[in-house]
Amino acid sequence: MNLPNMKSAKIRGEKNVEYRNQENLFSTQFEGKKYFIRTYGCQMNVHDSEEICFIVENLGFQKTEILEEADLVLLNTCAIRENAHDKVFGYLGRVKHLKRNKPDLMVAIGGCMPQQESVTKNILEKHPYVDIVFGTHNIHELSKMILNHQKKQEIEVYSIEGNVYENIFYKRDSKITAWVNIMYGCDKFCTYCIVPYTRGKQRSRKMEDILKEVYELKEKGYQEITLLGQNVNAYGKDLKKTLDFATLLEKVAMIGIARVRFVTSHPWDFTEKMIDIIAKYDNVMPYIHLPLQSGSSKILKLMGRRYTTEEYLTLFHKMKERIPNVAITTDIIVGFPGETEQDFMKTLEVVNTCKYDGAFTFIYSPREGTPASKMKDEVSDFVKEQRLQILNERINQYSLENNQKYINKIVPVLIQGISEKDKNKVYGYTDTMKLVNVNAEKNTIGTIILVKINAAKSFSLDGEIVISTKV
Ligand code: 5AD
Ligand code: SF4
């Protein structure tokens, strides 16, 4: 049994990152058995779940979408805010109930929540029906844990700085778009954020391994890849050879896959060279997610974000000037400790200036062990809710205005599946990451087609096929 420790998770030592090969255990032990997986949180977790699915299918399990059918329930969890945490414990209640009638049901919890000391302790003491607890550093041990499991709880949660595993296999959700990890962990330690503790220190994958993976995805017919990291523009800073994200992005673009995206960027590491590469290559999509967090330099300082409002705006304007047709989205937190009405007004001012294409907005949620959780928080819940509502109204207004500019335009859309809203339509995304529901045949799925936009809402566009550019 290995329990997590937040103090160890904070350490950023000189220890060299080890590059190891993942061992994939194969067994027929669970043939005929079914697994059910539920994923919470960010794209990193979504992609980790693709790895988890491969691991359990290699043991003989088959996927089911129906919880009640499952012999193994896997919850891949998120720790970023308290409500993510509450959702998981709420769902666990359902699973516990299920296990009463099905005592052989195996329950496994992984991801970011177990990396928190208090959570794993709580599972150990109060949730004995949970069989397996694995951390973000222990995914490669999951097959062993499942095969070894007897009666006792199996807990493996390391709080090490972290290593890099290669030779990872995934059961990818899509045959059209794919995630590609370029780095793991984060060294930024923004004062509100739990990620540097749950995901370990920044470790970049070697460039040749990333390029090989992208090349193989292209050969398999993938139309789009998204380079994935907590802070992709810091790519390479931890590698001995000096390497930067702009160089990697250019090399990836040159492989020639139709669409290349990346997420997430921190304004601090965003270089001029990166802007140039995005502008230069047609297959690097003109879409940037650039978290603001707050429009007040005072709050940004308390958040440990390392930029002022002015510096953020300078970068923002440079992107808009130099990347034709670029769409920019953001993340904003309201109610950070010490945020006054004036500070909040400054956030609204930046939103008015940037007129974002979209934003994820959050009420600040204290996370145990982070510096901000010890800061004095005098803003009432009522005021925080009010600020969030005002902010959301403003954000939605600008999303709608930006989307309305698309009406009557003809834009390329990568079609990804049947529309959820209308089974007679298909859906896809523009190069600027706008969701479009399209009047077109199902055989357009997996291709980029030209679409004439007829209508715009805050969160999506409607259109009809004009011409198919690729078959
Ligand atoms: N409280 C609220 N929002 C948070 N985020 C990260 N940590 C917290 C927290 N403690 C938000 C940030 C980040 C996004 C992924 O989640 O805006 O960019
Ligand atoms: Fe968290 Fe900041 Fe790292 Fe993003 S850059 S994962 S907000 S610590």
Image (cartoon, grey):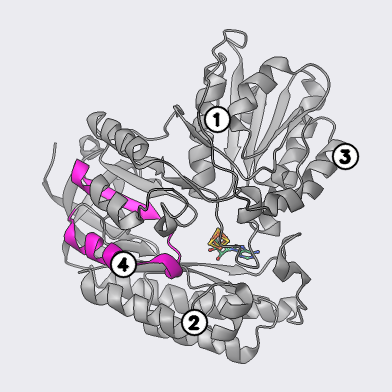
The answer to whether 263 is drawn above or below residue 471 in the figure is below
Residue 13 placement (x, y as % from top left): 63, 51
Question: Upstream in the sequence, badge 3 or badge 2?
Answer: 3
In this view, the residue farthest toward the top is 28
Whether label 2 touches label 4, CB < 8 Å: no
Q: Can see residue 458?
A: no
Give the residue at mark 4. Answer: 327
> For the residues carrying marks 3 and 2, which lies nearer the camera in this image?
2
Q: Is mark 1 within 8 Å of ligand 1?
A: no
Q: Earlier in the sequence, mark 3 or mark 1?
A: 1
Which residue is tagged 2?
Answer: 308
First along the sequence among labels 2 and 4: 2
Camera-near label (2 vs 1) is 2
Q: What secondary structure is found at the residue carrying circle 2?
A: loop
Q: Secondary structure at mark 1?
A: helix
Rate crowding at label 1 as few (under 14), some (14 to 19) or many (20 or more) other CA atoms within 10 Å. Answer: many
Q: Identify the residue under disc 1.
A: 52
10 Å crowding of disc 3: few (<14), some (14-19), many (20+): few
Amino acid beneath label 3: Lys
Alpha carbon of mark 4 to alpha carbon of mark 3: how far?
47 Å
Q: Mark 2 or mark 1, which has the lower sequence index?
A: 1
Q: Tell me which image quadrant ligand 1 sits in.
A: bottom right
Q: Tag 4, which secondary structure?
A: strand
- Give the Cα separation between the discs numbered 3 and 1: 25 Å
- Amino acid carrying label 2: it is Thr
Left or right of residue 349, residue 434 in this image: left
77 sits to left or right of 326: right
Q: Amino acid at mark 4?
A: Ala
Quadrant containing the N terminus is top right
Q: Residues within 10 Å of mark 4 (few under 14, many from 20)?
A: many
| Magenta region, residue range | 253-282
Which residue in the protein does label 3 denote?
A: 126
